[in-house]
Amino acid sequence: DIQMTQSPSTLSASVGDRVTITCRASQSISSWLAWYQEKPGKAPKLLIYKASSLESGVPSRFSGSGSGTEFTLTISSLQPEDFATFYCQQYNSYPLTFGGGTKVEIK
Amino acid sequence: EVQLVESGGGLVQPGRSLRLSCAASGFTFDDYAMHWVRQAPGKGLEWVSGISWNRGSIAYADSVKGRFTISRDNAKNSLYLQMNSLRAEDTALYYCAKDIGKWLGVFDYWGQGTLVTVSS
């Protein structure tokens, strides 16, 4: 199975900050990576798929990059509604696997 | 509007069974793969199982293989998860999730979840 490792597990930031979250795969997954945002009491929301493709309706301040085993999710200017937990997920092969999550907190 | 509504969760004793259902609407159900994803209390997301649009492909997480069975009824726009030999570690909120394709493994719509608690 492919293991997904996210860092950091928690991140403290202020509104307007540029935020970067890293996701590493235990083996190459090409660009078969998705990012989700989860807020308390809500279902996860798809942000990005195929490493860098923005899901329809997702603000352009979110961007993704990377391929192979190293990936990043960047929020160019953190907004109040962005404080949440973010997960990466590989879909290169089954079983599908998620990273452990990165909680973005208010500094 | 896409809607996914899970049901069937509840409190169940270890070793017993439970069947979850997911009613889908707002899209052509038999054009897409469907999945179950769970989240234990205070923990991260864990993919559980998926089934392709035509039931030709089915997959399970190692943690549930041999105990859980996924199925779908395209005539009823419904997804199911039969859970047998339940364990305490199966306690979680179970989400039904729609795939963006026929068997891709990316989830663009999620239900609100149904809670399964396994305890004596």
Image: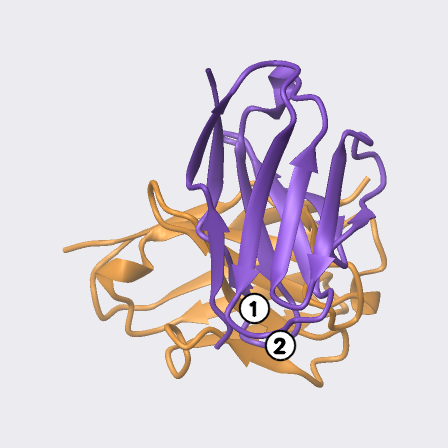
Mark 2 is on which residue type? Ser
For residue A6, above or below residue B77: above
In percent of width and height, residue B58 lies at 61, 80
**Quick one: SS at disc 2?**
loop
In percent of width and height, residue A50 lies at 77, 59
Residues behind callouts 2 and 1 on a single chain: yes
For residue B18, above or below residue A51: below
Chain A, chosen colour in render:
purple
Q: Which residue is mark 2?
A: A93
Q: Nearer the viewer, residue B80 or A100?
A: A100
Callout 2 environment at 10 Å: few (<14), some (14 to 19), or many (20+)? few
Chain B, chosen colour in render:
orange
Distance from Cα at disc 2 to Cα at disc 1: 6 Å
Q: Residue at coordinates 75% horizontally, 40% vertically from top-left?
A: A63
Report in which chain the residue with disc 1 lies: A
Q: Residue at coordinates 65% horizontally, 68% vertically from top-left?
A: A91
Q: Nearer the viewer, residue A76 or B78?
A: A76
Q: Nearer the viewer, residue B104 or B53?
A: B104
Q: Which residue is mark 1?
A: A96
Q: Residue at coordinates 48% horizontally, 40% vertically from top-left?
A: A102
Do residues under tags 2 and 1 come within 8 Å of each other at their CB atoms?
A: no
Q: Which mark is residue B109?
A: none
For residue B36, above or below residue A78: below
State the count of labels. Answer: 2
Mark 1 is on which residue type? Leu
Q: Is residue A61 left or right of residue B42?
A: right
In percent of width and height, residue A81 lies at 63, 19
Q: Residue at coordinates 33% horizontally, 68% vertically from top-left?
A: B17
Q: Nearer the viewer, residue B117 or B73?
A: B117
Q: Is residue A64 left or right of residue B83?
A: right
